[in-house]
Amino acid sequence: MELKPGRFFLIRVPSGSELISYIKKCAEDLGISVGIFWLIGSFRRAKIGFFMEEEGSYRTIDVNEFTEVINASGNISSIDGEPFIHAHVALGRMDGSCIGGHLIEGEVFIVEVWIQELIGGGLKRVKEGSLYLWPLE
């Protein structure tokens, strides 16, 4: 599927917001069906996941501490006509160690997001086993 750059957005997420649901709402409000994003900032708490292939599900890790977002990126596509947000994150702890994985949720302290809309067709995820993936084309 050929996609081309569309609109570009810079968004500051309000403190206390849950990041994944906030990005989903922005995608809905802005009419973004396909896109990519990057973010910087910090979380009061987060929940990340690590996919366990044998189990076909995510093992979740609660990060119940203040963390800095060292790196985070993701994409926007759709499942059943609704925006689906897929993000991965590396979080820095106060002692300098890092933890990372699939971002399930994050309570924002301060986060700034850059969203790049992609145009040229809707990118709909399809269910393969226990995951929703982009179709192979």
Image (spheres, helix red, strand yellow):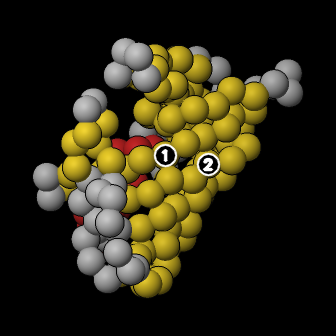
For badge 1, the amino acid type reads Ala
The disc, 2 or 1, on the residue closer to the chain's N-terminal end is 2
- In this rendering, does residue 57 appear at all? yes
Quadrant where the C terminus sits is bottom left
Asked if residue 47 lies left or right of residue 29, the reply is: right
Residue 45: image tag:
none
For badge 2, the amino acid type reads Ala
Q: Nearer the viewer, residue 39 or 36?
A: 36
| Residue 9 % position (x, y) | 49, 74
Q: Are marks 2 and 1 in contact (CB under 8 Å)?
A: yes
SS type, badge 2: strand
Residue 87: image tag:
1
- In the image, residue 92 sits, relative to residue 39, either above or below, namely above
- At a point 25% along the width and 40% down the height, the residue shown is 128
Label tally: 2
- In the image, residue 103 sits, relative to residue 8, either above or below, namely above
Task: Report which residue position mark 2 lands on.
Answer: 72
Within-10-Å neighbours for mark 1: few <14, some 14–19, many 20+: many
Quadrant where the N terminus sits is bottom left
Asked if residue 79 lies left or right of residue 25, the reply is: left
| Residue 131 % position (x, y) | 31, 36
- At a point 81% along the width and 25% down the height, the residue shown is 97
